[in-house]
Image: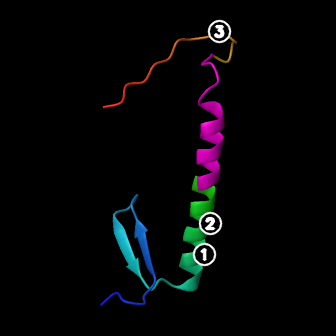
Amino acid sequence: MLHRRTLIVDGYRGELLVDPEPVLLQEYQRLISEEIELSRLAEDDVNLPAQLKSGERIKSCSMLV
């Protein structure tokens, strides 16, 4: 029974952790904070023009399926 239990669903590893130790819970909270920050940084860059380190601009396209 999972009622009133702490669960962590780790989609990267395909694991369900039930009542994890406090240190593990803190580690996952840290990882979530890092993921949020990385997503924010990526969203900031998504509208910038694509260019090489040399400064040469390149055309980029994406295809959503």
**Which amino acid does the dot numbered 1 rest on?**
Gln
Element assignment for label 1: helix
| Mark 1 burial class by Cα count in 10 Å: few <14, some 14-19, many 20+ | few
Q: Which residues are magenta?
A: 36-51
Element assignment for label 2: helix
Residue visible at 52% across and 85% down?
Answer: 21
| Mark 3 burial class by Cα count in 10 Å: few <14, some 14-19, many 20+ | few
Residue visible at 36% across and 30% down?
Answer: 64
Magenta highlight: main SS: helix
Say whether marks 2 and 3 touch (CB < 8 Å): no
List x then y, in percent, for residue 12. Answer: 40, 58
Query: Looking at the picture, does residue 35 appear above or below residue 61?
Result: below
| Label 1 sits on residue | 26
Q: Earlier in the sequence, mark 2 or mark 3?
A: 2
List x then y, in percent, for residue 35. Answer: 57, 54
| Label 3 sits on residue | 56
List x then y, in percent, for residue 61. Answer: 45, 19
**Which amino acid does the dot numbered 3 rest on?**
Glu
Query: Looking at the picture, does residue 19 appear above or below residue 32?
Result: below
| Mark 2 burial class by Cα count in 10 Å: few <14, some 14-19, many 20+ | few
| Label 2 sits on residue | 30
